[in-house]
Image (cartoon, rainbow, N blue to C red):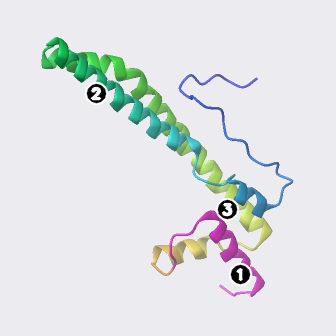
Amino acid sequence: MASYNWWRRRSKRKTLKKSASLIDRIEHGDFEVSQYLREANFELKLMEHEKRKICKKGKEEGWGKQTIEHDAREKTNQYRRRYNRLIKDFLRDDAKILQKLKNELNSKFDDYWEYLYNEWLDGNLEDLTVKELYKTYELIYKNDFEL
């Protein structure tokens, strides 16, 4: 049974079955940045919105600065806790997605990961989308490029 994660507002994104081709899974977005980053950023926006609402109400009702800050901190605590947990989930999930992509590319083609990564670090390779990375692997593989 799946565990309940109170800090997540949405269910996990649907990915294609492993039997689908790698390029289909890439085009579907199975290897894109983890959804938890967007969710965490959404929590920050909600928190800021709530803070602005509290500040406006406090000023209208003549609260002191400390009262407004205290009320804002108290009412936005849940958003902050959600954000922290979502960032943790993002880091964990994104590492899994990246490792899965690396494994899939290396099993379909040869292992060019380190080579391409070093080329990117050296500034010889632009940032690539996942699909562009796939095409680069494919090009190297088809041309039987020696590393």
Q: Mark 2 or mark 1: which is in front?
A: 2
Quadrant of the rendered structure where residue 140 is? bottom right
Q: Residues within 10 Å of mark 1 (few under 14, many from 20)?
A: few
Q: Nearer the viewer, residue 70 or 92?
A: 70
The residue at which mark 3 appears reads as 102
Q: Residues within 10 Å of mark 3 (few under 14, many from 20)?
A: some
Magenta residues? 125-147
The residue at which mark 2 appears reads as 52
Residue 145 belongs to the span the image colors magenta? yes
Residue depicted at 75% across the width and 80% down the height: 141
Amino acid type of disc 1? Leu
Residue 8 location, x and y as percent? Answer: 56, 29
The residue at which mark 1 appears reads as 139
Amino acid type of disc 2? Arg
Amino acid type of disc 3? Lys
- Alpha carbon distance from label 3 to label 2: 43 Å
Which of pointers 1 and 3 lies earlier in the amino acid sequence? 3
Marker count (numbered): 3
